[in-house]
Amino acid sequence: MTDDAHSEPMVHALLADGTTVCIRPVAAGDHEQVQGLCEEMSPENLRLRFFAASQRSAALAADRACAPPCPGYRALLAEKQGQVIGLAEYDTGGGKEEAEISIAVADGLHHRGVGTLLVDTWNARARRRSPSR
């Protein structure tokens, strides 16, 4: 997987309820909304996502996701009507063949396919760039 994911175009996709979302790379200007997404998570989801229920985790997550691109790390977001409703991050840990991925979805939008669309978008982008296609 190469590190040019930040230049990928936005895509529009359908959720399970028939509404559309925009999936695109995270930009520096998204910091406030990404932090808000994480801050609004329930204590249980904060614990599952960050292994802690600290609101500081939200600021740190937004700092990381919205930082300038760095090798092996990228973030995508899902927007619905201009509001960030999902965040997917991948980190290769310096390797080139595998990556860890994490997903956060707004509490009120679970089970509508937001996370699945984010993962599918990463997979499609990785396949397009794979030298072994």
Image (tube, rainbow, N blue to C red):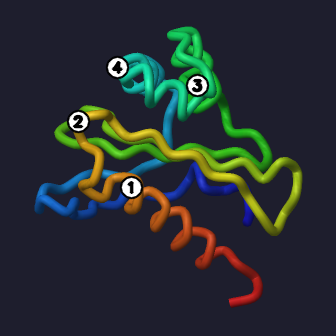
Whichever of labels 4 and 1 marks the residue nearer the N terminus, that label is 1
Q: Tell whether 99 sits left or right of 38.
A: right
Q: Which of 57 and 59 is in front in this view?
A: 57
Label 2 residue SS: helix
In this view, the mark in front (3 or 2): 2
Circle 4 is placed at which residue position? 40
Residue 108: image tag: 2
The amino acid at mark 4 is Glu
Q: Which badge, 3 or 4, is on the more N-terminal residue?
A: 4
Q: As shown in the figure, which amino acid type bears the numbered disc 2?
A: Gly
In space, the residues marked 2 and 4 are separated at their CA atoms by 10 Å
Above or below for 73 versus 132: above
Q: In this view, does 32 lie above or below 7?
A: above
Label 3 sits on what residue type? Answer: Ala
Q: What residue type is labelled 1?
A: Met
Q: Viewed as shown, does residue 56 lie left or right of 110?
A: right
